[in-house]
């Protein structure tokens, strides 16, 4: 719902208003409705608002609670804020606004650093304690809302995107070899706290930090997902009822907690179609839905309109279809990349950017189906991994998921960026986390808590908020995810994947949508690279900036340019697009 930023100088240097303004300018698209600053000597906080709840000026930020001596900047939505408000009123707290922002302030005052455990929603925020001179920062369990920061001996700075932090002159822009290894192995996933730039980090999902006046940082994890079966015996029908109840609650909460209309991004897949069905069951009238499609390339279809149209017909939604010609995609690509907080390889990033541009003209909030595949086992590689008999967890994962093996990474990158196999080591660490019963439980938990954060979740938030559009993701409601993580694998991997969701959808969603093969957000031009797209990528990789940066081994680049359609990753991403996107992102955002 917003963009936040701040600076805390440990050496007592005054925060310059002009610097804070520069940071806020880079956040304006996230919060087009209102902007304000708070300056207190060596501290400065900035906020750009997208008004969703309590549209009045009483909920403007930075929000100062003079009685409690606290000031907050907050991005996100707290879906249980009304319940928390009533609980806090019983503790004699008085409220001067009607939104969720003030509830966080009171919750922090009442329950201290553990308050974040009580928050149900998506959030990234910072609270300045006037008395202790400490900053408390927190990020939601799945990292749906971003929180970037830069820490030096002299100061702590944070923002909702990297571009905002790059307005500061002292940020180290050196590329991280470890982050690059993750980027090119996990299809653009750079797990927190890393980013591709050494001087900028990310707060880990499910964590909070406390930064004191001496620059000391204390970080704690407040949430961890367990993937173990319950002690009691539960039938498949009972699981279905449990998941349906949780999903209905998640959808309803993300509908009710808004003082503006809420729409749905309808892809034509099972997940978004089920959201439409449940919203209709909840009594929503005149439901607004939105779909996007692109030109076909060969046998690769560029739209899923044949499926989304069936859902529209069934539920009589107010529907908008956007068709984008490939020439228009290429024209708009530069601005989409300029708005990426980090490099994003997923071809649907540009699609979401173009769709959000149209959707924001009609609504400020949409529900989206992101997370369902990761939570409920929808991707084709999950059953293959489950059936594989390899004894080594990392090998079993890597051969179906890694974009490049370590040796290929070394062949691709200039020697300056060589190092050890960081991604395999990280994967092993995550696979060894406790409280997962079976191998596939480890894989799904890895995806839900780590990989999804920096792939589809980040893309959706980034590309929709670039147009002041808030995307809500019911399938990542933490109560729903916790329930789903306990289910036996056959209710996820069965029936071609997402078995439990297909059971729930039967009778609610057209059979053609349920029984179709798993689809992916179509944008063929960035998968099967040819024509003008190939020439564009060639021009980026042969540019003077690219030659000066010298990230890649020239022979590797020439190999991809010579026959781009020959080189795809294990999950069918274009390797040429990957290296082009990183180079182009650096050119647009860092140079």
Image: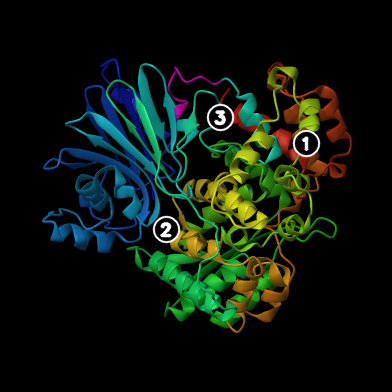
**109 is higher (above) or lower (below) than 368:** above
Residue 174 x, y percent position in the rendering: 57, 20
Outermost residue on the front side: it is 231
The earlier-in-sequence mark between 1 and 3 is 1
Give how far across and how far down residue 346 sits, in percent.
66, 47
Question: Would you say 140 lies left or right of 558 here?
Answer: left
Distance in Å between CA atoms under marks 2 and 3? 27 Å
Tag 2–tag 1 contact (CB < 8 Å)? no
Q: Secondary structure at mark 2?
A: loop
Q: Earlier in the sequence, mark 2 or mark 3?
A: 2
Label 3 residue SS:
helix
- Residue pointed to by mark 1: 405
Which residue sits at x=47%, y=80%? 281
The span picked out in magenta is 165-173
Which quadrant would the C terminus be assigned to in this image? top right
Disc 3 designates what residue?
589
Viewer-closest of 308 and 335: 308
Say whether residue 290 is left or right of residue 109.
right
Residue 59, compared with residue 547, is above or below; it is below
The residue that mark 2 highlights is 364
Q: In the depicted view, which residue is nearer to us: 298 or 198?
A: 198
Secondary element under disc 1, as helix, strand or loop, is loop
């Amino acid at each position: 719902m917003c963009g936040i930023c701040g600076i805390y100088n440990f050496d007592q240097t005054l925060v310059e208003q002009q610097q804070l303004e520069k940071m806020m300018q880079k956040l304006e698209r996230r919060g087009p409705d209102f902007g304000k600053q708070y300056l207190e000597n060596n501290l400065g906080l900035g906020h750009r608002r997208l008004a969703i709840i309590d549209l009045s000026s009483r909920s403007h930020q930075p929000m100062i609670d003079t009685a409690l001596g606290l000031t907050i900047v907050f991005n996100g939505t707290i879906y249980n804020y009304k319940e928390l408000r009533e609980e806090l009123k019983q503790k004699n707290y008085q409220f001067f606004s009607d939104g969720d922002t003030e509830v966080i302030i009171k919750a922090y005052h009442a329950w201290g650093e553990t308050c974040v455990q009580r928050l149900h929603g998506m959030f990234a925020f910072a609270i300045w304690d006037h008395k202790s001179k400490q900053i408390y920062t927190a990020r939601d369990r799945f990292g749906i809302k971003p929180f970037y920061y830069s820490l030096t001996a002299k100061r702590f700075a944070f923002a909702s995107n990297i571009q905002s932090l790059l307005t500061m002159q002292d940020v180290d822009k050196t590329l991280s070899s470890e982050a690059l290894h993750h980027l090119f192995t996990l299809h653009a996933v750079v797990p927190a706290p890393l980013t591709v730039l050494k001087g900028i980090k990310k707060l880990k999902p499910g964590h909070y930090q406390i930064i004191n006046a001496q620059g000391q940082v204390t970080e704690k994890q407040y949430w961890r997902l367990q993937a173990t079966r319950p002690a009691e015996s539960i039938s498949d029908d009972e699981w279905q009822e449990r998941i349906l109840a949780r999903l209905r609650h998640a959808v309803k909460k993300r509908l009710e907690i808004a003082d503006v209309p809420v729409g749905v991004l309808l892809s034509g897949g099972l997940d978004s179609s089920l959201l439409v069905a449940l919203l209709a069951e909840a009594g929503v009238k005149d439901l607004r839905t939105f779909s996007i499609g692109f030109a076909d390339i060969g046998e690769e279809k560029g739209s899923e309109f044949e499926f989304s149209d069936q859902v529209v017909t069934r539920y009589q939604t107010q529907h908008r279809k956007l068709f984008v010609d490939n020439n228009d995609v290429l024209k708009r690509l530069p601005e989409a990349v300029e708005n990426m907080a980090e490099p994003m390889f997923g071809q649907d990033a540009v699609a979401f950017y173009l769709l959000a541009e149209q959707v924001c003209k009609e609504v400020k909030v949409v529900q989206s189906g992101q997370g369902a595949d990761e939570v409920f086992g929808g991707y084709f590689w999950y059953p293959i991994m489950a059936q594989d008999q390899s004894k080594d967890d990392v090998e079993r994962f890597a051969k179906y998921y890694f974009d490049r093996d370590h040796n290929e990474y070394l062949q691709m990158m200039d020697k300056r960026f060589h190092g050890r196999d960081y991604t395999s080591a990280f994967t092993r660490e995550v696979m060894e986390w406790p409280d997962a019963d079976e191998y596939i439980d480890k894989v799904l938990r890895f995806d839900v808590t780590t990989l999804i954060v920096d792939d589809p979740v980040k893309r959706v938030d980034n590309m929709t908020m670039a147009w002041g559009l808030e995307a809500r993701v019911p399938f990542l409601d933490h109560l729903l995810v916790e329930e789903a993580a306990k289910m036996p694998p056959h209710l996820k991997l069965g029936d071609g994947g997402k078995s439990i969701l297909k059971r729930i959808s039967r009778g609610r969603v057209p059979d053609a949508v349920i029984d179709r093969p798993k689809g992916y957000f179509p944008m063929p031009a960035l998968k099967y690279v040819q024509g003008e797209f190939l020439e564009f990528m060639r021009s980026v990789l042969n540019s003077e900036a690219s030659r000066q940066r010298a990230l890649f081994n020239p022979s590797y680049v020439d190999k991809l340019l010579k026959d781009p359609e020959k080189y795809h990753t294990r999950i069918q991403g274009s390797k040429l697009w990957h290296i082009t996107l990183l180079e182009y992102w650096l050119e647009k955002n860092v140079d």
